Amino acid sequence: MAGGRAGVAHLRGPRLLNKDVRLSAAGLKAALMREAETLGFDCIGVTDPEGIGSAAKYFREFLDAGAHGEMDWLASQPERRMDPRVLWPGVRSIIMLGVNYGPTDDPLALLAKRTRGAISAYAQGDDYHDVIKKRLKTLARWLATETGEEVKVFIDTAAVMEKPLAQAAGLGWQGKHTNLVSREFGSWLFLGAIFTASDLPRDEADTDHCGSCNACQEICPTAAFPAPYKLDARRCISYLTIENKGPIPHEFRKSIGNRIYGCDDCLAVCPWNKFAREGREAKLAARAELRAPSLAELARLDDAAFRALFSKSPVKRIGRDRFIRNVLIAIGNAEDPSLAAEAERLLDDASPLVRGAAVWALSQLADREKFDALALRASKSEADESVRQEWLQAS
């Protein structure tokens, strides 16, 4: 089950192509594969601009349902995502590439260590946008030099539907958790795309191998999947802790547990992960200080210390205040009264977002007499209405 199959190149050397493919095209593609492997990519496939197929329809339904929440960038010019030719009329082939970031530890094991923060596996090392984009640009320059044709590079933040294109290129399939699943790498693949004006031989699209398995749906703590293959981002812990700019909605706070940046549950439980190898690239390896950081230590981060700790990390993009909000939700779920002091100290933080989360955390840990005394003090001094509402709800 874990071996390579016809129609997808996994960077283990040239593949045999159909006899009707011109030798020059075959030779170019074989050389492209070799260059990609040298640069650290684990899999590669080629599709055409029409590879998105029916995924465009489902994307429109996702937007119409408002399931994207505050991610307005998804709803901006959706036609650019649904048709690569709208994004770039000159594209003739789309090269999809993947880098394996399989974690060394089971992400689910950390959830039982309530005084430690769980950071999503992809965010425990250097920002993959920066690491992989450099590789993509290098490969794209090589291709442009070889063909004389124009190329464009995209990774994650661009208006490209990477997952359906990756399935069309044979790298895997979109699982019931809506992420790409690979028979070789499980649910642990970073994706990038190179659009080219060159006409390259296509790979065979992958097919769905989820079968009757619903593990990713069943494990979701916030029931973010209304149906298989459908995600309501507004309920997803990754969205709530990263994209959401305001307070964490009360209905999800207990379910978040100690997840302080993203959530790996639906990925980590995928049975196809048993075939995934540990990520081989050192720059993508987890930093020791981000594997299981202390909630107490994280709660003491000011802006400068936050920026220093998360230098080159994707976590840095959400800013100190949103991150400390997440840490305080985890502290409130830790069931460790010794952490109440950290929440109490942050009642005087400059950020209303942090103060509001501190109120909730303290309400979960402090004895009622002390909490009521602090609430009385806040009623006389707290000027922010959102924080005042937190006190009222917790009292």
Image: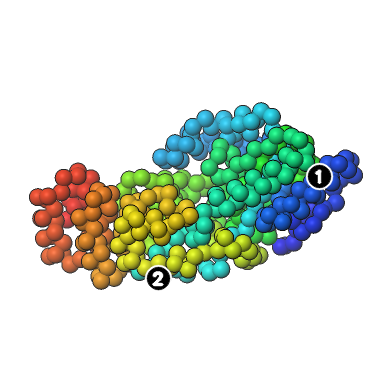
Give the side of residue 65 with respect to residue 52, left or right.
left
Q: Residue at x 63, y 33 (%)?
A: 84
Q: Residue at x 51, y 54 (%)?
A: 127
Disc 2 marks a residue whose amino acid type is Lys
Do the residues bearing badges 1 and 2 touch, measured as CB atoms within 8 Å?
no
Q: Mark 1 sits on what residue?
A: 28
Furthest residue toward right: 19
**Residue 285 x, y percent position in the rendering:** 55, 63
**Secondary structure found at label 2:** loop
Give the side of residue 3 with respect to residue 353, left or right.
right
**Residue 61 x, y percent position in the rendering:** 52, 36
Whether residue 154 is visible: yes
**Residue 354 x, y percent position in the rendering:** 27, 53
Mark seen at residue 113 = 2
Q: Residue at x 60, y 41 (%)?
A: 154
**Residue 102 x, y percent position in the rendering:** 59, 62
Give the side of residue 85 with respect to residue 202, left or right.
left
Query: Which coloring applies here?
Result: rainbow
Q: CA distance from mark 1 to mark 2?
A: 51 Å
Answer with the quarter of the image where residue 367 lies.
Answer: bottom left
Disc 1 marks a residue whose amino acid type is Leu
Q: Nearer the viewer, residue 61 or 281?
A: 281
Crowdedness of circle 2 by 10 Å Cα count: few (<14), some, many (20+)?
A: some
